[in-house]
Amino acid sequence: MTSQVRGAQLARLLGQWHALPGRRRSPDYAALAGAVRGLLADGRLPLGVRLPAERELAEALRISRTTVTAAYRELRESGHLASRRGAGSWTMLPGNHRMASTGLWTPSDDRDMIDLGVAALAAPPELLPAARAAAEDLPRYLGGAGYHPTGISELREAVAHAYDERGLPTSPEQIMVTNGTQHALDLVLRLAHSPGGTVLVEAPSYPNALAALAARRARITTHGLSVTEPGWDADLLLGSLRQVRPKLAYLIPDFQNPTGHLMPAELRERVVATAHAVGTDLVVDESFVDLPLDGTVVPPPTASFDRHSRVVTVGGMSKPFWGGLRIGWIRASAPQVQRLAAARVGVDMASPVLDQLVAVHLLDEAAAIVAARRAQLTVQRDALLAALAERLPEWRVTVPHGGVTLWAELDGPISSALARAAEEVGVRLAPGPRFGLDGTLERFLRLPFTLPAADLVEAVGRIAAVRYDLDRAARPRWREPAVIA
Ligand SMILES: Cc1ncc(COP(=O)(O)O)c(C=O)c1O
């Protein structure tokens, strides 16, 4: 299914295309073609999208049609546009290039490596006491078989209560406990998605969610986020939903991974209403919702605007507490939870009781634990920002007011080359294209601030050193593949 970008929408995306740096001597058509190529390379304009007719774009940009005709011709010649008479023109990359953004990645235990590929904190000090207390609780469960496909009731109650506190009334029957948020997403896809169905995702987005979608043979269509706040373009996002009418949309409205953006309340409401109107189910990933920084007020949960069970929410313990716990959940309608549980018994039966008990104890103390996490993340983010400003001042970053990552705009399309070079000096990076689908996003890099400040500063120093040699250095090769999370 091809979506179309209208003249006014493309004009807004193009912004000040005629005044881009370094275009002084190039004619208008070349500058326009260059600006379209830039949008494609950044993932802001998806591949396979139909561009407006020449006349429509000319009117929207208030330029002559001949200029647009010449720009489209240049884009066809450079391999960025395919046209068929009577059917229009679609965006593409030269040679129909598509780079896999997903694949088999295994963790590496190289202790000397500063791993900026993983955006997750080490366990909090409260974990060990919680694990001991959980072991004491365990005898209460040992008389039963231990299989609880929707989760043990005390954890379902604690999770439901947390939604209540956020202003989203939730009963424990609406919660299903999973082995992490990724598992939650996979289970939701099993139920809500059939192979070949279209799914709308943000670009950039979380690589392992893209992997889950690829595994389910989703036809993915993207909504390009801008680097600056708020990130989502309401008109384009709602327009894509109306045009493409995807079966599903997967969104991360709360401190989006990787950009850190926070979707405003008004847009949440409009997305839910539009999704309902066009028959799209929304899967909302709240992995980072507990981690606002700088006193940021988090808008109401996306599901609070839902009157028709269109929104399924997934979340978990990994980001505020610890990834090694492998506890996540799904919030859906009670009948949906029953269907999910029936699907789940064909996968893994149930989550470990002991780990669920640990989660209950941690959630009991959530306020204090999460407050400390936020304070820690604020210090680390600020150290990372200061190091970037000092060592790599050409890079543009939007300060994230929550979550655990920032999305840097680099001084060239160097992300993958930089990641290869950084690996040689002991820094593992997740380059921009890992967060997209088609080899775009080479001018971006996700940087998590989950490691201690000293490691972040050291890593930036090493990255800066290799960045400035990049053009001269021989191309290093990849070592071991590594997990990105
Ligand atoms: C947006 C998003 N969803 C899901 C996950 C996976 O979380 P979990 O460890 O709970 O499976 C992550 C982890 O980075 C994430 O960033």
Image (tube, grey):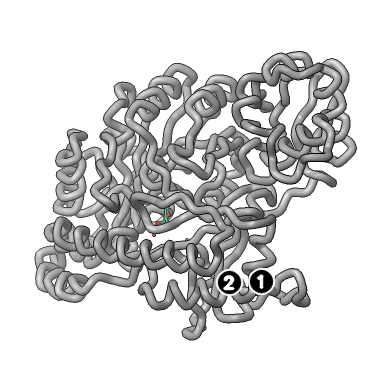
* 72 lies left or right of 239: right
Residue 468: numbered disc: 1
Q: What type is the residue that disc 2 sits on?
A: Ala
Please identify the quarter of the rendering in which residue 452 is found: bottom left
**Residue 462: percent from the left, percent from the top?**
55, 77
| Residue occupying image coordinates x 27% and y 63% | 321
* 283 lies left or right of 18: left
Q: For the residue labelled by badge 1, is the local secondary structure a helix, a strand or a loop? A: helix
Asked if residue 211 shows in the view, the reply is yes
Along the line of sight, the residue nearer the viewer: 485 or 457: 457
Name the quarter showing ligand 1: bottom left
Give the total of numbered labels. Answer: 2
Along the line of sight, the residue nearer the viewer: 83 or 353: 83
* 222 lies left or right of 451: right
Query: Where 103 sits versus 173, above or below?
Result: below
Q: Is disc 1's CB within 8 Å of ligand 1?
A: no
Residue 130: numbered disc: none
Q: Which residue is mark 2?
A: 464
Please identify the quarter of the rendering in which residue 168 is found: top left
**Residue 365: percent from the left, percent from the top?**
13, 60
Q: Are marks 1 and 2 in contact (CB under 8 Å)?
A: yes
**Residue 323: percent from the left, percent from the top?**
35, 65
Question: How dense is the environment of label 2, judged by Cα within 10 Å: few (below 14), some, or many (20 and up)?
Answer: many
Question: How dense is the environment of label 1, judged by Cα within 10 Å: few (below 14), some, or many (20 and up)?
Answer: few
Asked if residue 177 shows in the view, the reply is no
| Residue occupying image coordinates x 47% and y 78% | 458
Q: What type is the residue that disc 1 sits on?
A: Tyr
Q: For the residue labelled by badge 2, is the local secondary structure a helix, a strand or a loop? A: helix
